[in-house]
Amino acid sequence: MSNIETIIFDMDGVIVDSEPLQVESYNQVLRKYNIFISKHRFKYFVGKKQSEIFAEIKENNQIEESIENLIAQKRDCYLKLVKAKMVAMPGLSNLVRCLKDKGLGIGIASSSPLTDIKTILRCIKMEEQFDRVVSAENLEQGKPNPDVFLLAAKELNTTPEQCIVIEDTNVGVLAAKRANMKCIAMPNYFTRDQDFSSADFIVDDLYEAQEVIESLLVTCITGRRIG
């Protein structure tokens, strides 16, 4: 088995606990239509692209406003919340420092718009820590299609077999596995009821993810089979 060279992070729910702010920003935009998305209801949307979410909301509520306008409004609300409230997930800085010390490549592959990703990284002072940042916003298909992870591997100059993905959604895990990558699932409040049976490992937090990665690196070095 090829050695592990690269760790690819999803962003929302992995690098930052952004889902509560996502819910709040959607509700700020939809308030004028008397629509409210509960935290429980938002579980259904986690992992999808914003265009897919608004397309479904429009269809179910007969909203005439364009998806493009809704996304623009939502993004303005979200970025204001990000600048005021966003913090990194516990264990992120330790994990990134560990990966860099071991000479591994690190990247981000997210369904969120690239401007959102970069703004969040600036807010948590991590904008210089990732080798490549890839968004699925301009790809024809988002997760569970593997394209965003395959693109990330290409930009990181590595092969899928040499990548480990950290994801918090089942569609993200499926995308990683369809890309022929190892995947660590890290469920949270919004995703814990999803099916993670296809993940190679399931962890509670980034501290545990670091333990898994370090054990896999030892396994690669000694030549024993992973997983």
Image (cartoon, rainbow, N blue to C red):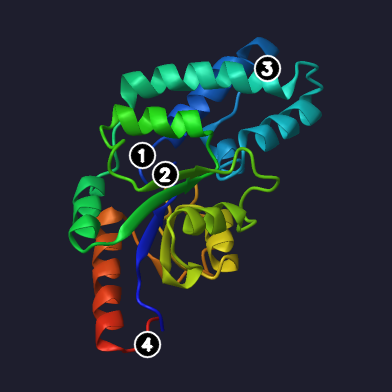
The C terminus, quarter of image:
bottom left
Rendered location of residue 167, percent (x, y):
45, 55
Q: Residues within 10 Å of mark 1 (few under 14, many from 20)?
A: some
Q: Which residue is mark 3?
A: 69
Q: How far apart in space, not on screen, are marks 4 and 1 (Cα)? A: 32 Å
Q: Quadrant of residue 183?
A: bottom left
Sequence-first disc among 4 and 1: 1
Rendered location of residue 12, percent (x, y):
44, 41
Q: How far apart in space, not on screen, are marks 2 and 4 (Cα)? A: 30 Å
Q: Residues within 10 Å of mark 3 (few under 14, many from 20)?
A: few
The answer to whether one can see residue 46 in this image is: yes
Is mark 1 in CB contact (under 8 Å) with mark 3?
A: no
Q: How far apart in space, not on screen, are marks 2 and 3 (Cα)? A: 25 Å
- Label for residue 225? 4
Rendered location of residue 129, percent (x, y):
28, 43
Disc 2, SS: loop
Q: Residues within 10 Å of mark 2 (few under 14, many from 20)?
A: many
Above-or-below relation of 197 to 156: below
Q: Which residue is mark 2?
A: 13
Is mark 4 in CB contact (under 8 Å) with mark 1?
A: no
Is mark 1 in CB contact (under 8 Å) with mark 2?
A: yes
Is mark 2 in CB contact (under 8 Å) with mark 3?
A: no
